[in-house]
Amino acid sequence: MNPALANELAARAADGWHPVTLSEIKAQLRGLGYALDRTLDCRSTAQIMTGPRAGKTYPTLSTGIKEADTARSAFHVEARRDAKFRALQSLRFEVGLYAVLGGAIMDL
């Protein structure tokens, strides 16, 4: 395993965060009326900008999230902003839902 990835996973585990499967992420999104848009996958390197780990990097995989019924990006200006959207934002920013795919972290 890439040492940068191992370090990031250890730091997240120390903070009480643990990876889930891609299937679990898809199920959580489906329950809220969203889906991943894997056509937007982009591999990169994330860099932590603040705090005691500032400057550390790790491999990342970003992707899109779309409304399942309209196929519109969840973040489009005309996308819905209802309770399910707020629940999606909670999964992203409070729960910290993520998976490890192909040697990179995919944060929701």
Image (cartoon, grey):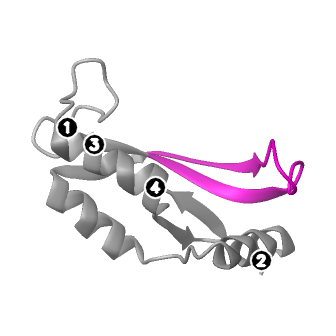
Q: Residues within 10 Å of mark 4 (few under 14, many from 20)?
A: few
Observer-nearest of 3 and 37: 3
What residue is pinned by disc 2? 6
Picture quadrant where residue 86 is located: top left
User: What is the spatial separation of the Cα atoms under label 1 and label 2, in whole angstroms?
Assistant: 35 Å
Eye-nearest disc, 4 or 1:
4
Give the amino acid type for the residue marked by disc 3 in the picture.
Answer: Arg
Tell me the SS state at disc 2.
helix
What residue is pinned by disc 3? 86
Name the residue: 22% across, 19% down.
78
> Does residue 15 appear in this view?
yes
Q: Residues within 10 Å of mark 3 (few under 14, many from 20)?
A: few
Eye-nearest disc, 1 or 3:
3
Give how far across and how far down residue 69 sits, in percent: 9, 42
Q: Which residues are magenta?
A: 40-63
Give the amino acid type for the residue marked by disc 4 in the picture.
Answer: Glu
> Does residue 108 appear in this view?
no
Tell me the SS state at disc 4.
helix
